[in-house]
Amino acid sequence: MEFIEYLRTRSGKVAREWGYAYQNVSLKFRSKRCSAAWQGHLGQCHMLVRQELQRVKPKTIMVIGSGLLLEIPIAELLAKAEKIYLVDLVHDRNIRALAKRHPQIELVEKDVSCLLQNLKKGQGPFQLKNIPWEHLSSWDLPKVDWVISANLLSQIPLMISESIPMTHSTYQDFARRVRDQHIDRLIQQGDEVLLFADFETRYVVHNQNRLKTESYNVNLRDLEFLREWIWEVSPYGETSKDYKVEMLVKAYY
Ligand SMILES: C[S@@+](CC[C@H](N)C(=O)[O-])C[C@H]1O[C@@H](n2cnc3c(N)ncnc32)[C@H](O)[C@@H]1O
């Protein structure tokens, strides 16, 4: 089923080559398999976006990492905003159909790391040393009243590291730089910002003890903490029968 859906998913060459098109399909199927476990997380995301929508009252909105819009109450955004940009490397057919029905929506297919054009999949980590960080292309997107970074901060470097083998310490340095860059660009993109993302991954066994906890650092500049919650991203049996995976999701504005 996933393979058939993958064939039906339109995307650019870069998204296909680097695995983002498949990841989009995988997210769709996983969200169905794990719908009970994900309910709380999706509810938290919707409530957060709704509350901030009331506060900011934007005319123009940009959602970065729009994906399948699982985490975004799009009907409410459509009811309030004049223009909504959905930015992602992949827009599946449901999102394309939605955009067709609502001319307020503009789909933008973009790599927000601006790195994929500079890197070669499968080649060694030596290329990371030559990244022209100061000269990477800009996002080149219109400035908006409100920009939302919708649960992709942790993933931007992770997806790249799955295609370029690198040591743990090389990854740590690379990921920090990519994430810091994301925050810097986000702050410049909108008058108001909402960022939510997973900041910690916990592998929990049946007696509730943790096998492992992973987290990362990022410079959040002057963004202010709003709230946090737990997302049971992989209930028992999804990744392993022996442990479940939980993420600590945090939101900032
Ligand atoms: C966890 S999903 C977010 C789900 C989405 N917010 C939703 O409501 O369905 C992360 C999204 O970030 C996108 N993404 C990851 N890296 C990206 C990049 N470098 N440029 C653009 N989009 C990226 C992925 O394609 C994916 O749709």
Image: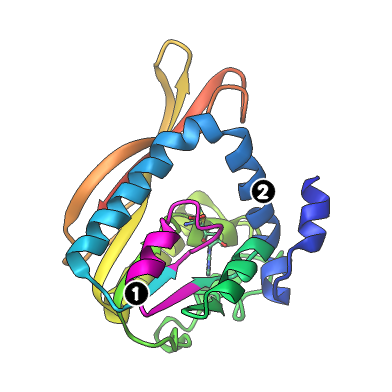
Q: Which residue bears the numbered disc 2?
A: 26
| Callout 2: CB less than 8 Å from ligand 1 | no
> Looking at the image, which residue is at 58% across and 42% down?
31
Image quarter (top left, top right, bottom left or bottom right) of the N terminus: top right
- Res 234 seen here: no
Q: Position of residue 67 (x, y in %)?
A: 54, 60
Tell me: residue 138, above or below residue 232: below
Q: Which residues are magenta?
A: 64-86
> Looking at the image, which residue is at 22% across and 70% down?
57
Tell me: residue 249, above or below residue 149: above
Image quarter (top left, top right, bottom left or bottom right) of the C terminus: bottom left
The part of the image, by quadrant, that contains residue 56 is bottom left
State the SS at label 2.
Answer: helix
Marker disc for residue 180:
none
- Res 8 seen here: yes
> Looking at the image, which residue is at 61% across and 19% down?
241
> Looking at the image, which residue is at 77% across and 54% down?
5
Q: Marks 2 and 1, Cα distance to the nearest angstrom?
A: 30 Å
Image check: 5 left or right of 28? right
Amino acid type for the residue under numbered disc 1: Ala
Amino acid type for the residue under numbered disc 2: Ser
Q: Residues within 10 Å of mark 1 (few under 14, many from 20)?
A: some
Q: Which residue bears the numbered disc 1?
A: 81
Quick one: label 2 or label 1, which is nearer the N terminus?
2
Q: Position of residue 231 (x, y in %)?
A: 41, 37
In front: label 2 or label 1:
1
Image check: 138 left or right of 183? right
State the SS at label 1.
Answer: loop
Image check: 162 left or right of 206? right
- Which of these two is toward me, 151 or 101? 101
Is residue 186 part of the magenta span, yes or no?
no
- Which of these two is toward me, 110 or 158? 110
